[in-house]
């Protein structure tokens, strides 16, 4: 996409590297924030940032602005797998974790393949990435809204008091 907007092959490769760095930040950062804040809000923020990045790219951005937009998209790409696992554990519990995570991760992989196909087919048909990016933008906005509407966790994490080690009764002072 960036090479079609005038980037040299080297600049486009650098942009891909920046997306990779953003994915690393997305993976580690999402884990940090998911542990400290209500996960649906963290997800809504991540996916909203991605939606903004996609909107900037769909508007035809090039140069440094396109790199910043790619970084914003990369953050959400990096966080997706962690988000799936975390939310599945909180909304489906450990008893159903394997099945629910399998469906969630399979959907993620299939959507990635479908997204690649849609981007290519959209470019072949319109000679522009704007139309397929608008479709992805709509999907990201919908995902953001759905995350924001998630209710409280059905399966809360174990409390820290439940994890405390207590002294055996024989060692308790009388």
Image (cartoon, rainbow, N blue to C red):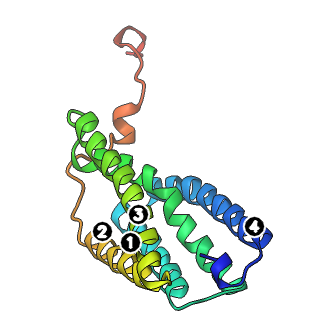
Residue 172 sits in which quadrant? top left
Residue that sits furthest to the top in the current view: 170
Judge by depth and name the residue closer to the eye, 165 or 70. Answer: 70
Mark 2, residue position: 147
Q: Disc 3 and disc 4: Cα gap in Å?
A: 23 Å
Mark 1, residue position: 44
Secondary structure of the residue carrying tag 2 is helix
Residue that sits furthest to the front in the current view: 125
Mark 3, residue position: 117
Check if mark 2's residue and mark 1's residue have beta carbons within 8 Å.
yes
**Residue name at image x 42 percent, y 16 percent:** 173
Give the class, few, some or many, for how many residues have Cα within 10 Å of label 3's Cα (few <14, many ≥20).
few
How far across and down, in percent of the image, does residue 125 sit?
41, 80
Q: Disc 2 and disc 3: Cα gap in Å?
A: 26 Å
Q: Earlier in the sequence, mark 2 or mark 4?
A: 4
Mark 4, residue position: 14
Q: Disc 4 and disc 1: Cα gap in Å?
A: 28 Å
In the shown orientation, is residue 94 left or right of residue 16? Answer: left
- Of the residues tagged 2 and 4, which is closer to the observer? 4
């Amino acid at each position: 996409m960036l090479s079609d907007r005038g980037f040299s092959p080297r600049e486009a490769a650098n942009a891909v590297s920046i997306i990779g760095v953003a994915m690393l930040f997305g993976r580690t950062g999402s884990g940090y924030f998911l542990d400290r804040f209500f996960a649906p809000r963290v997800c809504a923020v991540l996916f909203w940032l991605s939606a903004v990045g996609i909107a900037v790219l769909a508007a035809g951005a090039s140069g440094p602005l396109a790199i910043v937009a790619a970084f914003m998209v990369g953050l959400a790409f990096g966080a997706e797998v962690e988000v799936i696992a975390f939310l599945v554990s909180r909304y489906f519990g450990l008893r159903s974790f394997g099945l629910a995570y399998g469906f969630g991760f399979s959907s993620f992989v299939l959507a990635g393949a479908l997204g690649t196909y849609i981007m290519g087919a959209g470019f072949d048909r319109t000679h522009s990435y704007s139309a397929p990016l608008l479709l992805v933008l709509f999907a990201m906005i919908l995902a953001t809204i759905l995350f924001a509407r998630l209710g409280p966790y059905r399966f809360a994490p174990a409390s820290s008091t439940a994890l405390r080690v207590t002294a055996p009764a024989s060692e308790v002072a009388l």
